[in-house]
Image: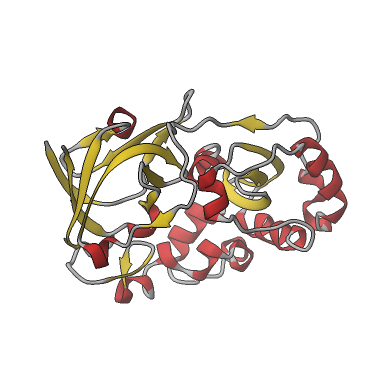
Amino acid sequence: MTYQGVLTKMETEFLEPIHYYLVFENDFINMNQLLNKSITLQFVKYQCLNCNLNKPIYRQGFCKSCFFDIPQAADWIMRPELSTAHLDKEDRDLEYEKKVQLQPHIVYLANSSNVKVGVTRKSQVPTRWIDQGAHEAIEIVEVPNRYLAGVTEVALKDHVSDKTNWRTMLKNDIVDENLVAWRDKLKAFIPEEAKDYFIENNTETNLNFPVVKYPTKPKSLNLLKSKTFTGVLSGIKGQYLIFEDDTVFNIRSNEGLVVDLTVN
């Protein structure tokens, strides 16, 4: 059975374990059902997630011209502290920016390879944690807009990491942390304008991923170079497919590639 479609971030369900779905235009693939099966991925062409043209992908699933033009790829996406919609100030498209920025946002701690601080829209909890491969997470602050979340994250970066080591995360070489204690320790460093939004009483969320076998030395698959790859799927964590031979494939970083997926 062969499916063809453009890669986009896998959809997820917060179940025990997490359920993953690869969504193509005409197919909806339950990836958990492919565990322990041999699958082949083959590169077909590019398809920009904005203009749909067969143009090389630059970043985030977009071709270069779209990346530097559309609001979905503006700097404030990756750096929330640059958000300006709360000031009624446009970056690329004020209507879009207000829709995304002027809604409740969460500053959180997640443990995927180490404890890190991050920002997400409230509506994206726990999806964001799943996508990062975090096995535990906790909300610290809930604020009414993206800007406040961004400046809080910047303040906390001086005291806790904001990066994930993807190899450590995929090897599951992780240590359980007391995130409630971390939350309380970091309270003192929350900026004045966000202090009233601190979440006093909550517990951490635990996440369990569908992995039969973790890689010992994960090596990343570059489908643009190899054009095709066949392997036995042994797990899914974050947005990575994990194969029996320690090859891993990041769906998120390959958005915009049209592939054939064959179940052998």
Query: Which quadrant holds residue 197?
Result: top right
Query: Which quadrant holds residue 173?
Result: top right
Q: Residue at x 47, y 64 (%)?
A: 94
Query: Which quadrant holds residue 142?
Result: top right
Here the colouring is secondary structure
Q: Residue at x 81, y 46 (%)?
A: 196
Residue 152 pos. (x, y %): 73, 57
Looking at the image, residue 233 sits to the left or right of residue 176; the answer is left
Viewer-closest of 105 and 117: 117
Looking at the image, residue 55 sits to the left or right of residue 85; the answer is left
- In this view, the residue farthest toward the right is 188
* Residue 48 shows in the view: no
Residue 239 pos. (x, y %): 42, 46
Vertical arrangement, residue 160 with respect to residue 65, above or below: above
Residue 56 pos. (x, y %): 25, 71
Vertical arrangement, residue 218 with respect to residue 128, above or below: below
Which quarter shows the N terminus? top left
Viewer-closest of 217 and 118: 217
Looking at the image, residue 219 sits to the left or right of residue 25; the answer is right
Viewer-closest of 141 and 174: 174
Q: Residue at x 44, y 35 (%)?
A: 213
Which quarter shows the C terminus? top left
* Residue 151 shows in the view: yes
Vertical arrangement, residue 102 with respect to residue 227, above or below: above
- In this view, the residue farthest toward the top is 16
Q: Residue at x 31, y 31 (%)?
A: 36
Viewer-closest of 26 and 130: 130
Residue 189 pos. (x, y %): 84, 56
Total numbered labels: 0
